[in-house]
């Protein structure tokens, strides 16, 4: 009887570990913080989340997606209470009003080609610095995949475009021109040979990519590695304890 119970316990433990590793391999979320400063140097920010999840779709999902609560500009009060930052993910064309602007947009796993998120940043006064920052865990994407942030505003006559590799770089900054909204594309691509670059120049409206440099490795990948390394030892110890009657 003890052997049956031991095998059942071990089987359950192995199944539990497999669930953890399989879920992390096919699902991920990346938070992106967009920030600037107000007139009194108060830090203003919006947080967006993009990701991939089994069971989600590329349309609006009540379970996975979150509508953005956008503050609309009021011309009568703009001088006293101006809107200084609005950042959101654009929903699908033809989507319902609640799904036109999103703070969280999780896509499905069944898309064969590239997945793309459209991000808009507006209402930032001219001359203000805007920072985009994120944090991607090591090994969070599948091998061969890259997540690129494209600054659509930087696309010029020569088709040059500022690219930031979110899996390698740590942030992106630009100076607001104070006119039209700033548009970005976040593209999940399987083309791992694409290189990021800030482009030429450093004047008004140009973007600057911040590299990770010597930033320490986050703990998520290390924890997963330790679990994978020591899980056989844990299973063996559980089996020995069960055989000896101590557990």
Image (cartoon, rainbow, N blue to C red):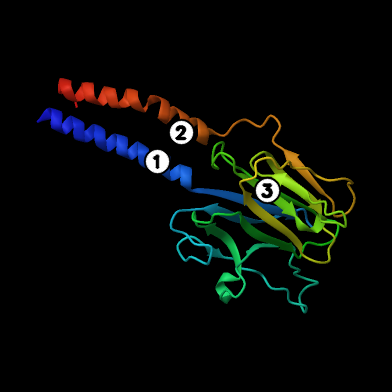
Is the residue 136 above or below the residue 240 in the image? Answer: below
In three-dimensional space, the C-alpha distance between marks 3 and 2, rounded to whole angstroms, equals 25 Å
User: Please, which residue is most extreme toward the front here?
Assistant: 112
Percent coordinates x, y for residue 57 in the rendering: 49, 62
Q: Residue at x 76, y 68 (%)?
A: 82
In three-dimensional space, the C-alpha distance between marks 1 and 3, rounded to whole angstroms, equals 27 Å
Side of 59 relative to 150 (left or right): left
Can you tell which mark lies on residue 148?
A: 3
Q: Classify the position of the N terminus by image quarter.
A: top left
- Residue 131 in sight in this render: yes
Is the residue 169 above or below the residue 241 in the image? Answer: below
In three-dimensional space, the C-alpha distance between marks 1 and 2, rounded to whole angstroms, equals 9 Å
Q: Earlier in the sequence, mark 1 or mark 3?
A: 1
Secondary structure at numbered mark 2: helix
Side of 107 relative to 243 (left or right): right
Percent coordinates x, y for residue 39 in the rendering: 80, 58
Q: Earlier in the sequence, mark 3 or mark 2?
A: 3
Q: Residues within 10 Å of mark 2 (few under 14, many from 20)?
A: some
User: Please, which residue is most extreme toward the bottom here?
Assistant: 76
Secondary structure at numbered mark 1: helix
Q: Earlier in the sequence, mark 1 or mark 2?
A: 1
Side of 28 relative to 132 (left or right): left
Are the two marked residues, 1 and 2, in contact with CB atoms closer than 8 angstroms? yes
Q: Residues within 10 Å of mark 3 (few under 14, many from 20)?
A: many
Percent coordinates x, y for residue 29 in the rendering: 54, 49
Q: Which residue matches tag 1?
A: 20
Q: Classify the position of the C terminus by image quarter.
A: top left
Q: Residues within 10 Å of mark 1 (few under 14, many from 20)?
A: few
Percent coordinates x, y for residue 12 in the rendering: 26, 38
Q: Which residue matches tag 2?
A: 224
Camera-nearest residue between 46 and 80: 46
């Amino acid at each position: 009887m003890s052997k049956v119970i031991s095998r059942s316990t071990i089987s359950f433990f192995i199944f539990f570990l497999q669930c953890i590793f399989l879920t992390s391999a096919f699902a991920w979320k990346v938070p992106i913080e967009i920030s600037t400063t107000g007139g009194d140097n108060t830090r203003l920010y919006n947080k967006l989340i993009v990701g991939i999840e089994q069971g989600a779709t590329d349309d609006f999902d009540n379970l996975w997606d979150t509508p953005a609560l956008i503050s609309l500009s009021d011309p009568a009060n703009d001088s006293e209470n101006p809107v200084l930052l609005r950042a959101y993910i654009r929903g699908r064309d033809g989507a319902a009003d609640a799904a036109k602007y999103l703070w969280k947009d999780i896509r499905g796993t069944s898309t064969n080609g590239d997945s793309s998120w459209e991000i808009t940043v507006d209402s930032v006064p001219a001359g203000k610095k805007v920072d985009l920052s994120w944090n991607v865990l090591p090994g969070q994407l599948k091998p061969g995949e890259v997540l690129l942030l494209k600054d659509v505003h930087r696309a010029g006559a020569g088709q040059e475009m500022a690219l930031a590799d979110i899996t390698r770089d740590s942030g992106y900054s630009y100076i607001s021109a104070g006119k039209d909204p700033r548009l970005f594309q976040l593209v999940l691509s399987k083309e791992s040979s694409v290189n990021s670059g800030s482009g030429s120049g450093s004047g008004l409206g140009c973007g600057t990519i911040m590299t990770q440099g010597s930033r320490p490795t986050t703990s998520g990948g290390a924890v997963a590695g330790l679990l994978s390394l020591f899980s056989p030892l844990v299973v063996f110890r559980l089996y020995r304890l069960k055989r000896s009657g101590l557990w």
